Image (tube, rainbow, N blue to C red):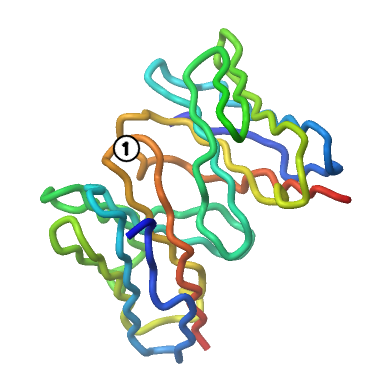
Amino acid sequence: LAKTTQPISMDSYEGQEVNITCSHNNIATNDYITWYQQFPSQGPRFIIQGYKTKVTNEVASLFIPADRKSSTLSLPRVSLSDTAVYYCLVGEAAGNNRKLIWGLGTSLAVNP
Amino acid sequence: GAGVSQSPSNKVTEKGKDVELRCDPISGHTALYWYRQRLGQGLEFLIYFQGNSAPDKSGLPSDRFSAERTGESVSTLTIQRTQQEDSAVYLCASSLGFGALFFGSGTQLSVL
């Protein structure tokens, strides 16, 4: 399974765009990239998933370069409520979620 | 229900006692997962149920841990003879067997 590397923490201010980059050099052909968000005292919440190029939903965008060895989660115009831990995971979208490796994630602090 | 429900939300117990944690998955979700999350850490896979298949127990840390699931409904995670190192948040997630995981809010277990 592809191991991921992401910054331990990031700081931002309200209204700014935040980009969190995740490295996954050993990503396999069948692997998708998935991001989860976790608030204190809650379970993680699915944000976005992609395979290549760009994916956008109402919450975030996910940019994946052609070599797929990294990905960037982009949060537009963050607010205080976006303060959370963000996890980058790599694995087959069709199953084997139990084999996903959850690292420490990136702790994002949004300041007023 | 609308989401994954876990109970109790908090459990304080004495070392050596048994505890039982409950998870109600989203209706129709065939897959159910239990994870453990220690303070400031990522998620640690414990056990996985998929339909009527034999559960994947490969993540259970010791034989003091066990889990059951009746059909595609409620699951219980039992920890016998609790130890202080069992203190953590126990998270349950369900899915359709592929794609995104939907998590409950977890049970905070404190072993004194």
Q: Residue at x 67, y 51 (%)?
A: A84
Tell me where residue A20 appears, x and y as whole percent: 70, 32
Q: Please name whichever residue, A75 or B64, is drawn nearer the observer in this view of the structure.
A: A75
Dot 1: what SS? loop
x 61%, y 12%: residue: A65
Who's the residue at 46% across and 74% down the image? B86
Dot 1 amino acid type: Asn
Estimate how packed mark 1 is, as few (under 14), some (14 to 19) or many (20 or more) residues with alpha carbons within 10 Å: few
Whether B50 is drawn above or below B83: the answer is above
List the single residue furthest toward the top: A66
| Residue A67 image-quadrant placement | top right
Q: Is residue A59 left or right of residue A31?
A: right
- Quarter the N terminus of chain A occupies: top left
In this picture, is A77 found above or below A44? Answer: above
Q: Residue A21's quadrant in the figure? A: top right
Of B2 and B58, the residue lying toward us:
B2
Would you place residue B45 above or below residue A92 in this image?
below
User: What is the chain identity of the residue bearing mark 1?
Assistant: A
Is B6 left or right of B31, judged from the image as shown? right
Residue of label 1: A96
Give the residue drawn at x 65%, y 25%: A72
Count of labels shown? Answer: 1
Q: Residue A68: x, y in percent?
A: 55, 15
Q: Position of residue A98 (x, y in %)?
A: 35, 45
Residue A16 % position (x, y)? 83, 34
Q: Is residue B4 shown above or below B76?
A: above
Relative horizontal placement of residue B83, taking residue A14 as reference (left or right): left
